[in-house]
Amino acid sequence: MDSSCVIPVSSLVRLIRELVEDNFVEVLVQGELAGLSRPASGHYYFTLKDERSQLRCAMFRSHARALRFSPEDGTEVICRGRVSVYPQRGDLQFIVEGIEPVGVGRLQLAFEQLRDRLQKEGLFALERKRQLPAFPTRIGVVTSATGAAIHDILNVLRRRSAGVKVLLRSVRVQGDGAAAEICEAIADLNDEGSAEVLIVGRGGGSREDLWAFNEESVARAVYASKIPVISAVGHEVDVSIADLVADLRAPTPSAAAELVVQNRLELERHLDQLLLRLAGQMRSKLELIRTRLTGLEKRLKAPEELLQLKQLRLQQLVLRLRQGMKQQHERCQQQLTALAGQLDSLSPLAVLGRGYSITRLADTEVLLQNSNQAEQGDRLQIQLQKGQVAAIVTGRTSARPSRKNLTKIG
């Protein structure tokens, strides 16, 4: 073996790398994504395979950020990039700079992926959508100042409601930076706070032209708006993510302007209907009052007759009161007479009137109940029905059953 032909591994790998990189500068490769991973660095690492072979791939962060859809395992794609060799392991790898899905277009796939994700988050929920104000006087518009959309909106507003004030925030509506400007304009109108409703949109165009309104940042700006938002992007057949998030979707900018203001003639017709209803209610109320007044008049037709009835009733009550008082007086008189008779029968004076007397010792006025209470020579005072008699005890006898304290005179 000729030792002069021996080279180090690193030299061989370097030669292979130079050969590969010089001859495979920009290659389009079709295959199925597998083993997809995206670490914190933001790079994509995956394998591109078909039924016979597989190829290690890497897509660095600067290119990964430009993707408009999220790659997933199993997706058939066409990758654009260059072939290189990883010198540390001598592995052949494909440095990917762009990915396009096969079959479904990349924009359609990106639209569907973002739509499904935001729907799961609840950004399209009907219960969070707000009613538009009935008669707004200040309308915020986010669109290009030079596009057809703003002219269509202003024409409709002038025709249908000339008194409305328009707050225009001019933005780019397509191309790089358009989504960021739309988000900033929505935030500015919310911070300014005078607009009562926002119209966000543009005229028709290709899917690429309308793509700014399919960006996630715009969808979240519409969702975060404190002011109700009408989305009006493209034509009726064009449906954007912004349309799904907005409180109301209009098929065109002109239709958005028509939705946001009431036609003056429609308003006048509505007011006429209200006046007719008010007049009818007033007639019904007046008829009710008239009926009540008629009833009151009937009740007040004969006040003298009502007064006579009240007077008759009063006389009857007075008569009943007098009769009751007389009967009560007679009953009381009878009770008083009976009590007086009982009192007279129990009075000591009445007993004295029947010939009895009351005897006391003259010195002590002690009532004598029996003869033992008096001694010979005691002075006595005898109470008669009429007057008194003085006496002196000259003798006494033993007590006999008789009325106590009473002495029969004569």
Image (spheres, rainbow, N blue to C red):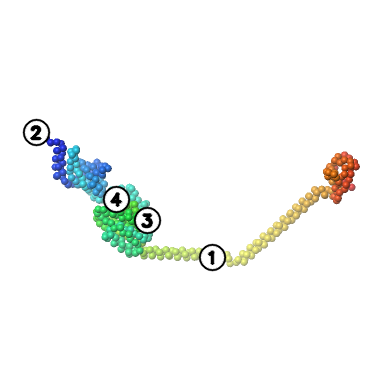
Q: What residue is disc 1 on?
A: 293
* Mark closer to the observer (3, 1): 3
Q: Position of residue 360 (x, y in %)?
A: 84, 45
Rendered image quadrant of residue 300: bottom right
Q: Secondary structure at mark 1?
A: helix
Is residue 262 visible in the rendered image? The answer is yes
In this picture, residue 406 sits left or right of residue 50? right
Q: Inspect the image, locate mark 3, and give the three-letter code of the amino acid beneath it.
A: Gln
Q: Secondary structure at mark 3?
A: loop
Disc 1 and disc 4: Cα gap in Å?
70 Å
* Mark closer to the observer (1, 2): 2
Q: Quadrant of the N terminus?
A: top left
Structural crowding at the residue carrying mark 2, measured as other residues with C-alpha within 10 Å and reported as few (<14), some (14–19) or many (≥20): few
Q: Position of residue 362 (x, y in %)?
A: 85, 45
- Decide which of tag 1 and tag 2 comes sooner along the chain: 2
Q: Nearer the viewer, residue 409 or 281?
A: 409
Disc 4 and disc 3: Cα gap in Å?
24 Å
* Mark closer to the observer (2, 4): 2
* Mark closer to the observer (4, 3): 4
Q: What residue is disc 3 on?
A: 131
Rendered image quadrant of residue 37: top left
Q: Inspect the image, locate mark 2, and give the three-letter code of the amino acid beneath it.
A: Asp
Q: Inspect the image, locate mark 1, and give the three-letter code of the amino acid beneath it.
A: Leu
Disc 3 and disc 1: Cα gap in Å?
47 Å
In the depicted structure, whether residue 2 falls above or below residue 84: above
Structural crowding at the residue carrying mark 4, measured as other residues with C-alpha within 10 Å and reported as few (<14), some (14–19) or many (≥20): some
Q: Secondary structure at mark 2?
A: loop
Q: Position of residue 96 (x, y in %)?
A: 21, 45
Q: What residue is disc 2 on?
A: 2
Q: What residue is disc 4 on?
A: 216
Structural crowding at the residue carrying mark 3, measured as other residues with C-alpha within 10 Å and reported as few (<14), some (14–19) or many (≥20): few
